[in-house]
Image (cartoon, rainbow, N blue to C red):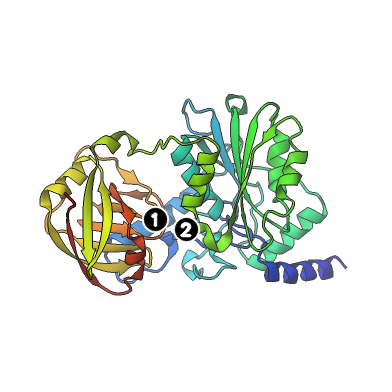
Amino acid sequence: MKKCLAIILSVCMTITLTACNGVQSGQSSINSSVAESKPQHTETPSSERSNESSSEQSKSESDNSAPVQANDTDSNILIAYFTWADNTKVDDPSAIDVDASTSASVLVPGNAAKIASWIEKRTGGDLFSIIVDEPYSSDYDECLDRAADEKAANARPTLKTRVEDMEQYDTVFLGFPNWWYTVPMAIHSFLEEYDFSGKTIVPFVTHGTGGLASTIQDIKADLPNSEVLEPIGVYRPEVDSSRPAVEAWLDSLGYTDDKSANSETENNERKLKMTVDGQEIAITLYDTPAANSLYEMLPLDLDFEDFNSVEKIAYLDSPLITEGEPDSFDPDVGDLCYYVPWGNLSIFYKDFRNSNSLVSLGRIDSGMEIILGMTGDFTVTLERAE
């Protein structure tokens, strides 16, 4: 009888797309966990970064065996999130179809992790991944079955990770997918493990067509002495393009200070324009050694090509000066970057993982739709806007 019920629930869940998804709810796209996507050609900057990302995933899985503590900062904000991608193990990432909504979110980063990273960049809070002791299956249907069983039993999965000093946090952003019209049972485990009295809880939810369902109502039952602020719900297929909506939501909550690594250089930023097929793309160039080096090279005619369905790349004739630049960078959609080992510029039109030797140069202010519309190779003129 229990098996029949699980099968019925699984069918319903497939129709409504609100099931086990890797950050998520109805299943997330990996955005560009491109870390695991297949290279289009060999020996290129992005293929090397793909290998780095796969190694990082393996390292993350092994590191999760011990309790973890949030970043060692003075922040009083914690950004805790649960994602399928961090709670499973994929033996062969290359076999995952990153375009399939029922499988892609087993690959890191999951949707909730992606949104959490945007919140971190805006608020300066500490990131914390909620990880269960017993990983979920990387098979979509098996994950659905277990989630259904846990919900039916009102289970409390044992957690592997732990916040060592929860008392230091006044505000906790809490992210999770909609699983079976409620929160994953691991969220109840997390909320019942600490005293949240007097704290402010800010939920962010990824979901399919079921929306938020009873997720907020159910976590409020665990938080009788906490203030739960207005949540944001992000529809699974729209996660990749949802950053403006997330930032508008943060603005509405009063988190208007952008504390990203580049915020200190805003007063010295310069404007560039990129022209392709008579269309102009507006770019802000940061005041950094590498960006300044690029600025001195302008104007440039560059030949761009697509790589890994994540970024447009063009090779420079001369290397940029990168002395004093950070060792790595975690690019988002619209970031203009430089990959040191291969000497190429990159414009990311999908999110990507933190990559060694990737240097941030600036960002696309307008015209990303032009970049997205370029399906083949194309030539641009990059010049100063003044």
Residue 251, image x, y percentages:
50, 40
Badge 1: how crowded within 10 Å, few (<14), some, or many (20+)? many
In the picture, residue 206 is in which quadrant? bottom right
What numbered label is drawn on residue 333? 1
In the displayed structure, would residue 245 be above or below residue 46? Answer: above
Residue drawn at (12%, 55%) of the image: 318
Quote the CA–CA distance across marks 2 and 1. Answer: 8 Å
In contact (CB < 8 Å): disc 2 and disc 1: yes
Residue furthest right as drawn: 1
13 or 356, nearer to the observer: 13
Task: Identify the amino acid type marked 2.
Answer: Ser
Q: Where residue 63 sits: x, y (%)?
A: 51, 44
Count of marks, rendered view: 2
Q: Residue 20's x, y, as percent? A: 65, 60
SS category of the residue bearing label 2: helix
Screen quadrant of the N terminus: bottom right
x 43%, y 51%: residue = 56
Which of disc 1 and disc 2 is earlier in sequence?
2
Label 1 sits on a secondary structure element that is loop
Q: Nearer the viewer, residue 184 or 2?
A: 184
Type of amino acid under label 1: Val
- Residue designated by label 2: 241
Depth check: 52 or 184 in front?
Answer: 184
